[in-house]
Amino acid sequence: MPLPSRVQIIDVGPRDGLQNEKQAVPAAVKIELVHRLQAAGLSEIEVTSFVSPKWVPQMADNAAVMAGLQRQRGVRYSVLTPNLQGFEAAVTTQPDEIVVFGAASEAFSRKNINCSIAESIERFAPVVQAALAAGIAVRGAMSCTVGCPYEGDVAPERVAYLAGLMRQIGVQRVDVADTIGVGTPLRVQRAIEATLQHFDIDHISGHFHDTYGQALANTLAALQMGVWNFQSSVAGLGGCPYAKGATGNVATEEVVYMLHGMDIATGIDLDQLVDAGVFISDFLGRPPQSNVARALLNQRAG
Ligand code: HMG
Ligand code: MG
């Protein structure tokens, strides 16, 4: 199978990245980060989530962040909505896409969204319907598609089951997420194969956390199957508050460097992306969690 010639990246740093930060990040900083990402050429950005502020305090400013964006034509802004309450709040902020998020593992579903997989689908169904009726695109995130912090290994059959349910309720595309970054290439390929029972390759994206340093290898394994949509976080921000010990998504800088080095287009300017990563990392008081950013910054300083 030839590798894709172009890859579409969703930067999830403002959401998946910042949701896990203990220190308050002002809405103005989040807005500036989104602006810097779009200036760097990101055409899809996961901005925030409309979840309970008691569960995830960092995302409590969701509406303010959405309202403060100077939107750029051609950029898709997505937000997470776990239930109708979240959707109703989100829709007033005019997202281009909403994301319902389920898990392939029962235990993670309960810890993360306080309900079983079956119940989560019942909650998502009216959200998906309302979004589609309003002309808003719908993505489904599938957590723990290879491993779960509570249940250990997750079988591909569990992924196929969840993907089938997502399909049934009208989700248009899905993310195969390795929430805790334990996956290795062949296991990730099995999770993608399971998803292919219900979604075609153009509607599957890879969402890999880099906890064990496998995310780029997993990205390549997905590319080799024809996947051309990926999620990553500028400066490697993040982790999930309900997946203890899991580090951030693979850094967008890492993915872009690898893809450009393979002559795969992304539309992203790596230098500007590194600057966006420095901006948010400076705010957080640490260097970007990205080898590529570090190398390029050293070269600049050189
Ligand atoms: P619940 O407690 O079961 O909900 O939480 P409830 O319907 O019983 O409501 C209880 C309270 O929450 C009520 O408030 C509701 O108003 C409020 P109270 O009367 O107690 O004051 N509430 C809400 N408030 C704001 N927005 C809402 C909302 N819904 C209810 N949408 C719920 C269920 C899903 C809300 C909760 O469990 C929650 O917010 N969980 C947070 C989940 C989360 O954000 N996790 C991180 C994102 S997922 C992720 O990172 C993985 C991903 O990156 C992929 C991967 O890597 O795997 C996507
Ligand atoms: Mg994630």
Image (cartoon, helix red, strand yellow):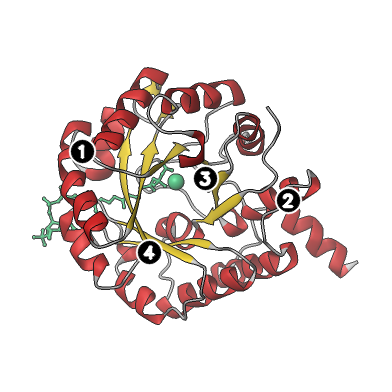
The image shows residue 182, relative to residue 208, as above or below, that is: above
Q: Residue at x 62, y 72 (%)?
A: 279
- The reply, left or right, for residue 268 in relation to residue 116 is right
Q: Residue at x 22, y 58 (%)?
A: 133
Give the amino acid at mark 3.
Thr
If the image is split into quadrants, where does the C terminus sit?
Answer: bottom right
Q: Is residue 36 in sight in this rendering?
A: yes
Q: Which of the two discs, 3 and 1, sits closer to the camera?
A: 1
User: Where's residue 227, x and y in %?
Assistant: 57, 37
> Which numbered marker is on residue 96?
4
- Of the two numbered discs 2 and 4 on the same chain, state the one appearing first in sequence: 4
- Name the residue that disc number 1 marks: 121
Q: Nearer the viewer, residue 226 or 153?
A: 226
- Name the residue that disc number 2 marks: 291
Q: Which of the two discs, 2 and 4, sits closer to the camera?
A: 4
Q: Secondary structure at mark 2?
A: helix
Inter-mark Cα distance, 4 to 1: 21 Å
Q: Nearer the viewer, residue 296 or 221?
A: 221
User: Where's residue 67, x and y in %?
Assistant: 35, 79
Give the amino acid at mark 2.
Asn
Q: Which of the two discs, 4 and 3, sits closer to the camera?
A: 4
Label 1 neighbour load within 10 Å: few <14, some 14-19, many 20+: many
- Name the residue that disc number 3 marks: 247
